[in-house]
Image (tube, coloured by chain):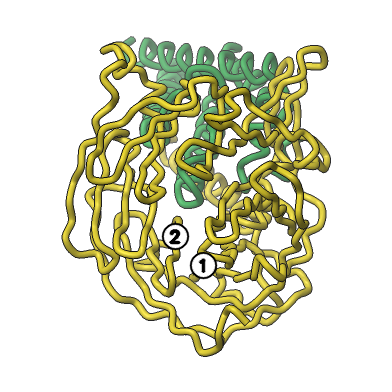
Chain colours: A yellow, B green
Amino acid sequence: MVKKSVIVIVCIILFSFLVIAALYALSDVPSSDTKNFKREFGDVSIVKKKVLNLSGNSYYIAGMTNSQVFLGNRKDSLKLVVTDTSLHNLQQVQLILTQDLTEDDRENPKLKNSYIEIDSPYFFIKAGQLPGLYRGELNRWQTKRILPKTPFFEQAVPISQNSFVMRAILTNAESKTHQNVLYKISENDPEPKINITLLEGQIDELFSTDGLLRYSKKLNLLVYTYAYRNQYLVMDTSLNLKHKGNTIDQTAIAEIKPVEIKDRIFSLASPPAIVNKNTQINEDLLFIHSNVKATNESKNIFEKMSVIDVYNLTTQAYKFSFYIPSYENNKMITFRIVGNKVIALYDRCLISYELKFIKNPFL
Amino acid sequence: MKKELIIEVIVFLFVLLFLYAAGIKLTEYKLFIAQMGVSPLITKYAKILAWMVPSLEIIISILLIIPKFRALGLYAAFALMMVFTFYIIAIFSVSTELPCACGGVLSKLGWKEHLIFNICFDLLGLIAILFNNLLDTGKQQSETKIATA
């Protein structure tokens, strides 16, 4: 009799395994779908220079200058790791918070969720949930609080030593709907100036307008790259829209499903189709890490590499693409580019690459 | 006697687990659909699973309580638990950032802890099935003895 139940048990285990295996085989993550466009490779070659192993996977890139790379640590919000661009000479720095903070403030978990950003010769601590902004000088490491009237923010980009452009969520008091907005705050103009028309919703006003805010010092322009559609916005530092640029893929409408899961609490009902994963600016070039495969790319290679599309911000033209390769089966998480040096962050290491241009990217 | 007690305890635990989980899923219906929606394995079937999973949990609980159907209930409970367990293993390989859709306090478990929790229940189910089977065999043997005596 026991034998019979053992047979049934084994059948059950097999059956359960097959059900899940079938679901797994049939599942899809809506990302590397091929849309009808082509990429141009061959204008640059990328050469790996050095691998720097990191102790843990809680690091993020705080900034990069011509000579140095700075890493922040999510587990220790006041610690900064500094190395030169060839990834030698590692140093650890402890940032010193301004004396006018109380002991309670220092232990505040919302301060622990802050991010450091480097804007030579300054560095900034961005604590969007406090909210608070702190500034210090590189190599002196003491901070002082700036722009005390800043409201909560999710993203903050310094456009000078005492002015910032932020992305925050604006909630309509009556309808209780939320939307992403960009606002500017500066020492001369301490009340936040919101431009509510810039981010245009599709489907909804919150998830569909998700994206990344970046600044080009050389052009004194801001760029907001949408996450789920093939568009980026170019604005001046007063938040006036200058151009709407299009990325080369064809996703014009965000493929997302926002739903209300509780009273006025929203979420996405299925994994979103990410179009533009990450973006960085160097001088007048916009680098976009795209999640959409082109028709002239091999699926195998696309899934192993991270493709970067390069656009000229003055002409809004697409220039070329290149790959940042995976390392030991891990894909690149984020990157920074200064000149022809590329620094890429992976799960537990930082890798420096050099781009060799075959054609002049400024043409 | 001991086997019967153990089976009772295990049945009680399963009924408790399933009714709790089903209760949460039905009261937080929209949240449950959203959580499943984010999982690439089951996003296509989220709406169907939203009523099917809690219904199965309730039906199995009923089977476990009614003595006549307890054996069937134990097999069904084990089967459901195995499906959940394999699902966790599959999700592990996709991403560890996805939310768990089990509901309530179970969602607070990390994926590793969740796997251990499920494996424990798989083993409990296995023990209950085997003990129940041994008891039935024992009863049949003693009935046969009485009949032939």
- The chain carrying label 2 is A
Q: Which chain is mark 1 on?
A: A
Give the amino acid type for the residue marked by disc 2 in the picture: Phe
Asked if badge 2 and badge 1 are on a common chain, one would say yes
According to the image, label 2 marks what residue?
A: A335
Height in image: A328 above or below B102? below
* Residue A25 vertical placement versus A59 (above, below): below
Measuring from the top left, give residue A278's x and y in whole percent: 56, 55
* Relative image position of residue A141 (x, y in whole percent): 25, 38
Q: Is residue B13 left or right of residue B63?
A: left
Q: Position of residue A243 (x, y in %)?
A: 77, 57
Residue type pointed to by label 1: Ser
Q: The residue tagged with tag 1: helix, strand or loop?
A: strand
Examine the image and state in which quarter residue A152 appears: top right
Find numbered disc 2 in the image and state the secondary structure of the residue it sits on.
strand
What residue lies at 70% left-to-right and 50% top-to-bottom?
A: A235
Q: Quadrant of the C terminus of chain B?
A: top left
Q: Residue at x 34, y 27 (%)?
A: A144
Q: Residues within 10 Å of mark 2 (few under 14, many from 20)?
A: many
With respect to residue A249, does A276 lie above or below? Answer: above
As rendered, which of B78 and B99 lies closer to the eye?
B99
Return the residue nearer the eye: A295 or A242: A242
Q: Which mark is residue A306?
A: 1
Q: Position of residue A122 (x, y in %)?
A: 36, 44
Instruction: Look at the numbered discs 2 and 1 and tell me whether their residues touch, using CB distance below 8 Å.
Output: yes
For the N terminus of chain B, the quadrant is: top left
